[in-house]
Image (cartoon, rainbow, N blue to C red):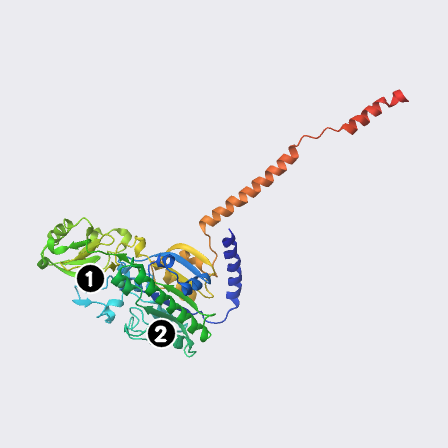
Amino acid sequence: MNSMLTLLFSGIVACCAHSTGDSVSRLLLVSFDGFRADYLETYKLPHLQEFIEDGVLVKQVTNAFVTKTFPNHYTIVTGLYEESHGIVANDMYDADAKKKFSQFNDSDPFWWNEAVPIWVTNQEQGNGASAAAMWPGTDVKINDTTPQFFLKYNFSVTFEERVEKIVAWLNSSNPVVSFATLYWEEPDASGHKYGPDDTENMRKVLEEVDNHIGFLTNKLKAFGLWDTINIIITSDHGMASCSAEKLIILDKCIGRNNYTLIDKSPVAAVLPRQNKRVVYNLLKKCNSHMKVYLKEEIPDRFHYRHNKRIQPIILVADEGWTIVQNESLSKLGDHGYDNALPSMHPFLAARGPAFHRGYKQSTMNNVDIYPMMCHILGLTPQPHNGTFSNTKCLLADQWCTNIPEAIGIVIGAFMILTTFTCIIIISKNRVAPPRPFSRLQLQYDDDDPLIG
Ligand SMILES: [Zn+2]
């Protein structure tokens, strides 16, 4: 109940502050690839914890299916499910255009133009420039536009170099950079290499990530940006442990000349070369730890059907299982699995003038991040799949009803009211005490004539 009152009070304060504020809202969106939600509880991350205490935390973010890097980074910046923004996998094939997409061949705008990311909208609506120290798509001319400032993707550029760039851009006043992105490849790379349950190696890399957050914080403070900028730290997906005992070997079930494998484990995209039904039936009988869907059978909850880049047959491995043709296991951790699995979920933390302080909520969807960011930047959003009201409790200028707390307040008020009513009823119905002195008086009066 206390935090509800705090929310209401800070909402009033922020509303008043907002109406008199004259500076442009600014937002820095940071992604640490493959940061599984529960790493926050397993490891000591003092810089990130300090950041959270000063802002808000969403403990688990439900991401989009497939839970892979390119698709989810594009979902975060468009608010669209993958079938709607068109980046449906890390490896894609478009049969009409006869084009291929991979993370090493990703700069053809053709793939990105089914949606308009927030950095483009930000510049088009004229609130300021956008800048990107990497983020999938930021070095591509989407809608004929790149961020005004950006780095070409290069994994060998250090985190410190990326931060130096982004802070310098944010510090320039002509033009004002109102939206910026920052991307880092860890802890994803180590999660794949060691597996997320290798606590010794994961501790090391997460300490590094935490130190990176400390470095970013110090840079923003040194440039006087810390108190005015809004920062979101989140990720694209989590990580599950894989093992050599959990291999699904396609070559045991179907000849390779029957199909082309467009995207690989743990959600594999299959383009049949022969009769689709025959390929489907062979795959269907292959392994009980792999679901096989014809495109039209893919469950509604995945929002993963209505795009021509989604292949005719999709294979979805159970958590921890790896689909191969006949290769041996190449990584001890992987992601891409069912987005209902907690192991696939990242977290979201945010701080700055737009956010409450010390507020935590258990879940949100990553499609909701986009309308929240548009609200902070004062942008009219493009059509999207998110729900702005899911993020209201995080925002300082919004009224929010947290249902469990609201129920608590109603029950509390009811109990207080009942107690007072009972006290009043009891005190009214109390039997009048005997009045010995009156009676004595009466008797005295009665006796009076006798005395007289
Ligand atoms: Zn990855």
- Residue nearest the observer in this picture, 314 or 192: 192
Q: Position of residue 282 (x, y in %)?
A: 12, 51
The dot on residue 160 is 2
State the residue at coordinates (53%, 45%): 412
The residue pinned by badge 1 equals: 330
Tag 1 and tag 2, C-beta contact below 8 Å:
no
146 over 257 or under it: above or below: below
Q: Position of residue 345 (x, y in %)?
A: 32, 57
Amino acid type of disc 2?
Glu
Quarter of image, res 235: bottom left
Quarter of image, res 183: bottom left
Disc 2 under 8 Å from ligand 1? The reply is: no
Quadrant assignment for the C terminus: top right
180 over 416 or under it: above or below: below
Secondary structure under tag 2 reads helix
Q: Is residue 238 left or right of residue 426?
A: left
- Residue nearest the observer in this picture, 177 or 229: 229
State the separation of the CA atoms marked 1 and 2: 30 Å
Disc 1 under 8 Å from ligand 1? The reply is: no
State the residue at coordinates (18%, 64%): 93
> How dense is the environment of label 1, judged by Cα within 10 Å: few (below 14), some, or many (20 and up)?
few
Reading the chain from its start, which is encountered first: label 1 or label 2?
A: 2
Q: Position of residue 96 (x, y in %)?
A: 17, 64
Secondary structure under tag 1 reads loop
Residue extending farthest to the front is: 200
Amino acid type of disc 1?
Ser
